[in-house]
Amino acid sequence: MKIAVTLPTNRRIKPKTAESILRMIAASEHEIIPIVRTEGYNTAENRGLVWVQAVKQGADYIMCVDDDMIYEPDTIDRLIAHDKDIIGGAYNVRREVKQGAQVIEYLEGEPKEGVFKCKALGTGLMMIKSEVLKKIPQPWLGYKYAESGMVTMSTDWVFCEKAREHGFDIWCD
Protein backbone atom coordinates (compact mmCIF):
# COMPACT_ATOMS: atom_id res chain seq x y z
CA MET A 1 0.00 0.00 0.00
CA LYS A 2 1.24 3.50 -0.86
CA ILE A 3 0.85 6.16 1.84
CA ALA A 4 1.48 9.88 1.29
CA VAL A 5 2.60 11.57 4.50
CA THR A 6 1.61 15.18 3.86
CA LEU A 7 2.90 18.20 5.74
CA PRO A 8 1.72 21.73 4.95
CA THR A 9 3.74 24.43 6.67
CA ASN A 10 4.65 28.09 6.34
CA ARG A 11 7.30 27.90 9.05
CA ARG A 12 10.01 25.64 10.37
CA ILE A 13 9.23 22.10 11.48
CA LYS A 14 9.86 21.50 15.17
CA PRO A 15 12.84 19.12 15.68
CA LYS A 16 10.85 16.68 17.83
CA THR A 17 8.11 16.67 15.20
CA ALA A 18 10.60 15.84 12.46
CA GLU A 19 12.06 13.04 14.57
CA SER A 20 8.63 11.57 15.32
CA ILE A 21 7.60 11.69 11.64
CA LEU A 22 10.82 9.90 10.66
CA ARG A 23 10.21 7.24 13.33
CA MET A 24 6.62 6.83 12.15
CA ILE A 25 7.75 6.38 8.53
CA ALA A 26 10.51 3.93 9.52
CA ALA A 27 8.07 1.84 11.58
CA SER A 28 5.50 1.51 8.80
CA GLU A 29 5.35 -1.59 6.63
CA HIS A 30 3.94 0.48 3.75
CA GLU A 31 5.54 2.42 0.91
CA ILE A 32 5.76 6.05 2.02
CA ILE A 33 5.70 9.16 -0.15
CA PRO A 34 6.65 12.25 1.90
CA ILE A 35 5.09 15.47 0.56
CA VAL A 36 5.93 18.82 2.17
CA ARG A 37 4.51 22.13 1.00
CA THR A 38 6.07 25.35 2.29
CA GLU A 39 4.74 28.01 -0.06
CA GLY A 40 1.18 29.12 0.25
CA TYR A 41 -0.89 31.82 1.80
CA ASN A 42 -2.51 29.66 4.45
CA THR A 43 -2.94 26.17 5.82
CA ALA A 44 -6.01 25.43 3.68
CA GLU A 45 -4.13 26.23 0.48
CA ASN A 46 -1.03 24.26 1.49
CA ARG A 47 -2.98 21.25 2.73
CA GLY A 48 -5.05 21.20 -0.47
CA LEU A 49 -1.88 21.32 -2.57
CA VAL A 50 -0.25 18.38 -0.76
CA TRP A 51 -3.46 16.38 -1.11
CA VAL A 52 -3.53 17.03 -4.87
CA GLN A 53 0.09 15.85 -5.12
CA ALA A 54 -0.71 12.72 -3.11
CA VAL A 55 -3.58 11.78 -5.42
CA LYS A 56 -1.46 12.52 -8.53
CA GLN A 57 1.34 10.29 -7.19
CA GLY A 58 -1.04 7.37 -6.76
CA ALA A 59 -1.23 7.23 -2.98
CA ASP A 60 -3.82 4.85 -1.57
CA TYR A 61 -4.01 6.84 1.66
CA ILE A 62 -3.13 10.36 2.71
CA MET A 63 -1.68 10.79 6.18
CA CYS A 64 -2.10 14.38 7.37
CA VAL A 65 0.41 15.69 9.88
CA ASP A 66 1.28 19.13 11.28
CA ASP A 67 4.64 20.79 11.86
CA ASP A 68 4.33 21.09 15.65
CA MET A 69 3.05 17.71 16.89
CA ILE A 70 4.69 14.49 18.02
CA TYR A 71 3.47 11.16 16.60
CA GLU A 72 3.80 7.63 17.91
CA PRO A 73 5.81 5.30 15.63
CA ASP A 74 2.82 3.00 14.98
CA THR A 75 0.42 5.81 13.98
CA ILE A 76 0.36 5.12 10.22
CA ASP A 77 -0.18 1.37 10.47
CA ARG A 78 -2.61 1.71 13.39
CA LEU A 79 -4.90 4.09 11.48
CA ILE A 80 -4.78 2.03 8.27
CA ALA A 81 -5.62 -1.14 10.18
CA HIS A 82 -9.07 0.31 11.00
CA ASP A 83 -9.91 0.41 7.26
CA LYS A 84 -11.99 3.60 7.54
CA ASP A 85 -12.41 6.19 4.79
CA ILE A 86 -11.47 8.99 7.19
CA ILE A 87 -9.96 8.41 10.62
CA GLY A 88 -7.81 10.44 12.94
CA GLY A 89 -7.06 11.05 16.55
CA ALA A 90 -8.09 13.62 19.12
CA TYR A 91 -5.24 15.88 20.20
CA ASN A 92 -4.87 18.95 22.35
CA VAL A 93 -5.25 22.36 20.74
CA ARG A 94 -2.21 24.58 20.33
CA ARG A 95 -3.77 27.45 22.27
CA GLU A 96 -5.46 26.71 25.55
CA VAL A 97 -9.14 27.41 24.95
CA LYS A 98 -9.88 25.52 28.15
CA GLN A 99 -7.88 22.99 30.10
CA GLY A 100 -7.26 19.93 27.89
CA ALA A 101 -9.32 21.25 24.97
CA GLN A 102 -9.10 18.88 22.02
CA VAL A 103 -9.47 19.20 18.25
CA ILE A 104 -12.58 17.06 17.92
CA GLU A 105 -16.34 17.57 17.75
CA TYR A 106 -18.31 14.63 19.08
CA LEU A 107 -21.62 13.42 17.70
CA GLU A 108 -22.99 12.45 21.12
CA GLY A 109 -21.33 12.77 24.50
CA GLU A 110 -17.60 12.31 24.79
CA PRO A 111 -16.41 8.71 24.23
CA LYS A 112 -13.13 8.11 26.01
CA GLU A 113 -11.65 5.06 24.29
CA GLY A 114 -11.83 2.85 21.23
CA VAL A 115 -12.80 3.80 17.69
CA PHE A 116 -15.96 5.89 17.33
CA LYS A 117 -17.76 8.19 14.88
CA CYS A 118 -17.47 11.91 15.42
CA LYS A 119 -18.66 15.06 13.70
CA ALA A 120 -15.22 16.56 12.99
CA LEU A 121 -11.52 16.10 13.73
CA GLY A 122 -8.42 18.15 13.23
CA THR A 123 -6.30 17.37 10.16
CA GLY A 124 -3.13 17.52 12.25
CA LEU A 125 -3.60 13.75 12.69
CA MET A 126 -5.87 12.29 10.03
CA MET A 127 -5.74 9.41 7.55
CA ILE A 128 -7.88 9.70 4.41
CA LYS A 129 -8.38 7.15 1.65
CA SER A 130 -7.51 8.84 -1.65
CA GLU A 131 -10.81 7.64 -3.11
CA VAL A 132 -12.58 10.02 -0.71
CA LEU A 133 -10.90 13.05 -2.28
CA LYS A 134 -11.83 11.83 -5.76
CA LYS A 135 -15.52 11.87 -4.74
CA ILE A 136 -15.61 15.28 -3.04
CA PRO A 137 -15.44 18.33 -5.32
CA GLN A 138 -12.65 20.82 -4.78
CA PRO A 139 -11.87 22.95 -2.96
CA TRP A 140 -11.76 20.40 -0.15
CA LEU A 141 -10.63 22.92 2.43
CA GLY A 142 -11.35 26.51 3.27
CA TYR A 143 -12.79 28.73 5.96
CA LYS A 144 -16.24 30.00 6.88
CA TYR A 145 -16.54 33.58 8.07
CA ALA A 146 -18.95 35.66 10.11
CA GLU A 147 -20.10 39.02 8.75
CA SER A 148 -17.47 40.61 11.01
CA GLY A 149 -14.76 38.75 9.12
CA MET A 150 -13.95 36.43 12.01
CA VAL A 151 -13.41 32.76 11.18
CA THR A 152 -16.37 30.66 12.31
CA MET A 153 -15.19 27.33 10.88
CA SER A 154 -11.62 26.24 10.22
CA THR A 155 -10.29 24.15 7.35
CA ASP A 156 -10.51 20.89 9.31
CA TRP A 157 -14.20 21.32 10.06
CA VAL A 158 -14.96 22.51 6.52
CA PHE A 159 -13.39 19.31 5.14
CA CYS A 160 -15.25 17.09 7.62
CA GLU A 161 -18.53 18.86 6.83
CA LYS A 162 -18.03 18.32 3.07
CA ALA A 163 -17.07 14.69 3.64
CA ARG A 164 -20.23 14.04 5.69
CA GLU A 165 -22.34 15.80 3.02
CA HIS A 166 -20.92 13.29 0.50
CA GLY A 167 -21.76 10.28 2.65
CA PHE A 168 -18.48 9.71 4.49
CA ASP A 169 -18.22 9.10 8.21
CA ILE A 170 -15.50 10.66 10.33
CA TRP A 171 -13.89 8.25 12.79
CA CYS A 172 -11.63 8.80 15.80
CA ASP A 173 -9.19 6.34 17.35
Image: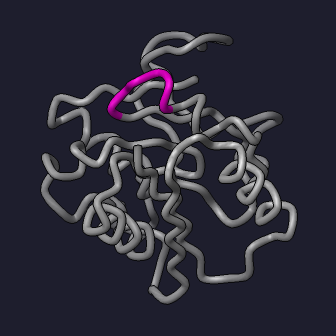
At 74% across and 74% down in the image, what residue appears? 13
Residue 160 percent coordinates (x, y): 35, 41
Residues 33 and 108: in front is: 33
Q: Which residues are magenta?
A: 80-85
Is residue 97 among the parts visible in the rendering? no
Q: Is residue 106 left or right of residue 70?
A: left
Q: Is residue 25 left or right of residue 70?
A: left
At 63% across and 43% down in the image, what residue appears? 28
The colour scheme applied to this rendered structure is one colour
| Residue 149 picture quarter | bottom left
Residue 17 percent coordinates (x, y): 78, 61
Is residue 108 among the parts visible in the rendering? yes
Residue 27 percent coordinates (x, y): 71, 43
Q: Is residue 104 above or below residue 34?
A: above
Q: Look at the magenta stretch and give its main secondary structure.
A: loop
Q: Is residue 152 left or right of residue 98?
A: left
Q: How many callouts does the rendering have?
A: 0
Residues 151 and 159: in front is: 159
Residues 23 and 144: in front is: 23
- Residue 82 is covered by the magenta coloring: yes
At 13% across and 46% down in the image, what residue appears? 135
Residue 97 percent coordinates (x, y): 73, 45
At 38% across and 43% down in the image, what residue appears? 128
- Residue 166 is covered by the magenta coloring: no
